[in-house]
């Protein structure tokens, strides 16, 4: 009669039980510490993003104001103002693209999550 026929459990190898339990515990602790670290990093990123929102809003506002001024300068240059033409020419040499304020679309708002 074998062990399988009698319904008894085979003997557990006690030598492997401790190393396996230690490995499982180590893996659990690793995952737990990584999770805690990720939550802390997430909170830090949220704080940094919140602190940058006012700066981004001010930058967007400044960009819109500069675009309006540049557009008005381009309109003056198109109307024949020699000083405005010089300004527009110098801005184009520096890589600025000028268009009239009517043709300038509003800047998109930053995406919020």
Image: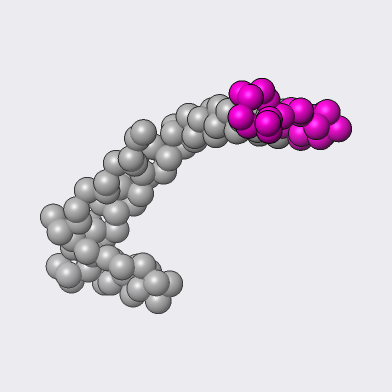
Snapshot quadrant of residue 90: bottom left
Which residue is pictured at 27% across the width and 48% down the height?
107
> What percent of the width, then of the height, locates residue 49?
49, 34
Residue segment shown in magenta? 1-25
> What percent of the width, then of the height, locates residue 78?
17, 70
Horizontal side of residue 1 vs 95, given as left or right: right
Horizontal side of residue 10 vs 57, given as left or right: right
Q: Nearer the viewer, residue 15 or 45?
A: 15
Q: Is residue 14 visible?
A: yes
Which residue is pictured at 80% across the width and 32% down the height?
13
Horizontal side of residue 39 vs 53, given as left or right: right
> Up-down: is 63 above or below 40?
below
Q: Is residue 33 visible?
A: no
Which residue is pictured at 27% across the width and 46% down the height?
108
* Magenta span contains residue 47: no
Snapshot quadrant of residue 89: bottom left
> Up-down: is 33 above or below 88?
above
> What percent of the width, then of the height, locates residue 36?
64, 27
Snapshot quadrant of residue 109: top left
* Magenta span contains residue 9: yes
């Amino acid at each position: 009669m074998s062990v399988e026929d009698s319904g008894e459990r085979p003997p557990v190898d006690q030598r492997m039980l401790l190393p396996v339990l230690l490995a499982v515990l180590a893996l659990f602790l690793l995952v737990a510490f990584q999770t805690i670290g990720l939550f802390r990093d997430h909170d830090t990123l949220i704080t940094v993003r919140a602190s940058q929102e006012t700066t981004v809003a001010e930058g967007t506002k400044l960009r819109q104001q500069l675009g309006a001024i540049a557009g008005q300068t381009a309109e003056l240059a198109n109307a024949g103002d020699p000083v405005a033409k010089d300004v527009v020419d110098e801005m184009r040499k520096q890589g600025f693209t000028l268009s009239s304020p009517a043709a300038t679309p509003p800047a998109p708002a930053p995406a919020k999550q």
